[in-house]
Amino acid sequence: MESITKNRQSPEVLRAMVERAYGAERVPVGEDWCSELGHGWFNVAYRIRLRDGAEVVLKIAPPPAVEVMTYEHGAMSIELNTLELLRAQTTVPVPAVDFADRSRELCDADYFFMPYIDADNLGIIAESLPEAEHDALMEQLGSLNREINSVRGGHFGPLAGPGHTSWRQAFTTMTEDVLADGERRGVEIGWDYDTVRATVAEHADSLDEVTEPRLVEWDLWSGNAMVRDGRIVCIIDHERAFYGDPLIEAGFTGTQLSAFGDPAPFMRGYGHPDLTETQRIRRRLYCLHLMLIMVIETVYRGHTDTHQYDFALPRLHEAMALLGRTRR
């Protein structure tokens, strides 16, 4: 996926990064030692073969001159902190961090190296899998997501703070940040922005049912699960995590928006029963929040085609209708 947030670097800079991380004796030589992993949407990631044959992945944060959405500030630090939490408090398979550099001496952004995971991306191979195999993997994803959500936080909101004492305050702040981002860039969302604000406010009391902050990935789609021999062997891309309501996780999106697929295998693996009425209202708010991001980020990322916008805008209208708003 092409995006202006991808901070590509020259071979000379990449070699300097490798030397700092692994030492001069492992710096690649010759040709064909580096290729870009193109399925990411935000950071640039390179697959690099070191001189001794070991393969690693280099992930580089967006350049500071490129404006990102409010919730994306410090995304690489969030990912590094989340990886540390998951390694310390769960058995969820996540990448090791070989080296992280936040000095901005070699390039204008943070970066880190991790081992290359020799496995298939579930999001890429999903359509080619037999239904039973795909469902089994989605059950695994649900089970792993539940373990991620077992990590408790001391506040709601960003991992590093500032924290909120209530989920209502955290989520409404998150949503307001997204709406303000859209207004600042004049993004057409098909609704008056204040109407969206009023819709969230009308249903915000449903958020009060959530009283315990849990670590949520929020972005744990099948494309962030790596699969080998019928098992999920690694969960990648942890830069959007925060403390909140586990029901906001991506795997539950299809309970309200059918375009996101059948959530039943994920929910079986997670061990989550059918949603209550209050949970359905919360999940509809979370769908609205997600669709706002998917529409508004197309402007921030400088998308040159309208595929994502054309998909997300009707889903935004659908989420608003589920919350009692219809377009005239």
Image (cartoon, rainbow, N blue to C red):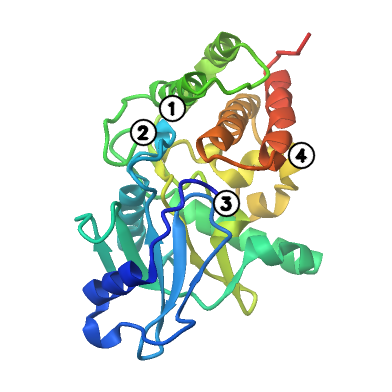
- Which one is nearer the viewer's eye here, 17 or 308? 17
Crowdedness near tag 4: few (<14), some (14–19) or many (≥20) residues, C-alpha within 10 Å: few
Disc 3 and disc 2 in contact, CB within 8 angstroms: no
Disc 4 and disc 3 in contact, CB within 8 angstroms: no
Q: Residue at x 71, y 31 (%)?
A: 315
Above or below, 228 against 81 in this view is below
Q: What residue sits right under mark 1 in the picture?
A: 174
- Amino acid tagged 1: Met
Q: What residue sits right under mark 4 in the picture?
A: 258
- Amino acid tagged 3: Glu
Crowdedness near tag 3: few (<14), some (14–19) or many (≥20) residues, C-alpha within 10 Å: some
The residues bearing labels 4 and 3 have C-alpha atoms spaced at a distance of 26 Å
Crowdedness near tag 2: few (<14), some (14–19) or many (≥20) residues, C-alpha within 10 Å: many
Disc 2 and disc 4 in contact, CB within 8 angstroms: no
Q: Residue furthest bottom?
A: 52
Q: Is residue 240 visible?
A: yes
Question: Seen in the image, is 191 located left or right of residue 245?
Answer: right
Q: Residue at x 36, y 47 (%)?
A: 63
Q: What residue sits right under mark 3 in the picture?
A: 2
- Amino acid tagged 2: Gly
Residue 310 x %, y %: 73, 35
